[in-house]
Amino acid sequence: MMMHLNVSDAAIQMFSGGFTVKSSASRDFIGEKRQFPRQPRYRVDFNCIREDSDAIRSFREMTAMWPEPSIRVYNNLLSDIAKKEKYSVALNVFGEMRHLGIAVDAYTMNIVINCCSLLKRMDFAGEIAEAEALFKKILSFKLCDVNDVMILTVVNGLSKAGNSLTARDLLVAFGKTGYEANVRAYNAVLDGLSKHGMLDDALLLLSEMVEKGVSPSIFTYNALIDGYCLRGEMDRGKELFDSMAKAGLKHDIFTYCSLIKGYCKKGNLDEAWRFFHEIPRVGLNHTTVSYSTMIQGLMRENRFADGWKLFEDMEAQQVHPNLHTYTILLDGLCRNQKIDEAFSFLKVIEEKGVNPNIVTYGVLINGLKPNLEIYNMMIDSLYQQGFDGEAKSLISEMKRNGCAPDSVTLNNIIWNLMKRNKVHDAIPFLEEMCNRGFSAHSANMSMLLHELQGEGKDDNLQEMIENVVLKLKM
């Protein structure tokens, strides 16, 4: 069983304790020697790692090798696990490495800190504090050499997790250790501060950055311009736009998109159009984002015909629309009471292989009064894509609007849940089907009977399935 991980304490034990693995006798966490059976060393193949258990097995095999694999091999394992987005597994393997006294290096710490940050971004929560604590201890105790990758990983992770002020404080702490962060680290923090509306803090950090001899890049300016545009302070955004040329920096498509979006939100379509048309004149290519942003601005100002014409131009220029573009267009159709066209366009979107999401369906619901058939289509699509929570919300809204789920609704839900082995989740819908006297489709009955024949199910679930099957057969 993998042990509970406290990353920062693990680092202290490894570095200050100086545990290493040099012979067949390893030391455990409290320093006692432990003997492991050894097997001849062979080449480690990480291509076989598919599941969590594969990663753990590979690690166990490595610890049993003789001679002991180098830290580079362990780092390769951690890196491979992290690339597969199994961040919690990577951290647990790191904990086991600590437990066995395996010496690590700065590259190991880069991987660990990155995993902590990514866990927060992937909504596992909690580990970002470990990343911060670990990094502070690395600085305080000089446990290993701090490098650009490590700094960027920490401040970028903190900023994306909404802790931009903490990231800024860490940048200040770096300076006190004599190590100066590079422009990429500053940009990550500036971007986080700007996106969260903390532009005064961002400007102070920019001043400090320049004083330390770090030259702002185009990304630095883009972050600040975007921040001002988000706040609707277009004069400040335009001022920075003009100052870029004086600094010898060329505007890119992101600079223009920020200004177009800002002017559109302010309702100043003339300025938005001016920057939109300037894009090809300065040698840049329009993107899906630049077109979508301008189309949305036109639609919001009730210029539907101009927005749709721009969409046609977008396709003619072979700039491919994405789901966001299509959702904007659907919203425009609904706002203009073009109901039939909206549903026809929805079918066109699906035929192109683009799957609508909850935002798309929300646009339709807000603009229309969907009937049972439309609700069934939307709910089925959400379950197929795995958006169970959104589908449940839509079912609740459907009922509030006086449109009760019918046999088709319930059978579709049950089918989608059971084919993903979510039998527990399907039971309430099966019971509702029984109570309302609906019949189960043959495919659903087949899956239920198959579940009854399966082994290893808990008694309560087995009993629930049996009761449902009996009711459906009556």
Image (cartoon, grey):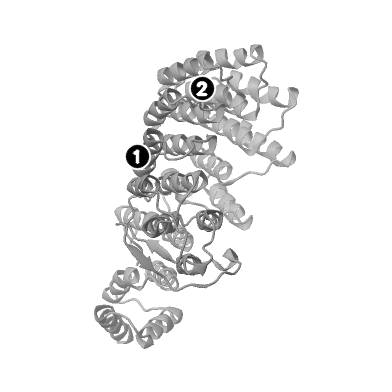
Apparent side of residue 471 relative to residue 375 in the rendered image (left or right): left
Q: CA distance from mark 1 to mark 2?
A: 29 Å
Nearer-the-camera pick, 126 or 463: 126
Vertical position of residue 224 compared to residue 361: above or below: above
Q: Tell me where residue 105 appears, x and y as whole percent.
A: 49, 47
Nearer-the-camera pick, 244 or 226: 244
Apparent side of residue 320 relative to residue 206 in the rendered image (left or right): right
Q: What secondary structure is found at the residue carrying circle 2? A: helix
Q: Residue 31: which quarter of the image?
A: bottom left
Residue at 48% over, 51% down: 357
Vertical position of residue 342 compared to residue 408: above or below: above
Residue at 36% over, 58% down: 99
Tell me, yes or no, if residue 405 can be seen here: no
Q: Tell me where residue 312 appears, x and y as whole percent.
A: 68, 39
Q: What secondary structure is found at the residue carrying circle 1? A: helix
Residue at 69% over, 33% down: 286
Mark number displayed over residue 414: none
Disc 2 marks a residue whose amino acid type is: Leu
Which residue position is annotated with label 2? 224
Disc 1 marks a residue whose amino acid type is: Ala
Which residue position is annotated with label 1? 133
Apparent side of residue 46 relative to residue 1 in the rendered image (left or right): right
Label 1 Cα neighbours within 10 Å, binned few <14 / some 14-19 / many ≥20: some
Q: Residue 474: which quarter of the image?
A: bottom left
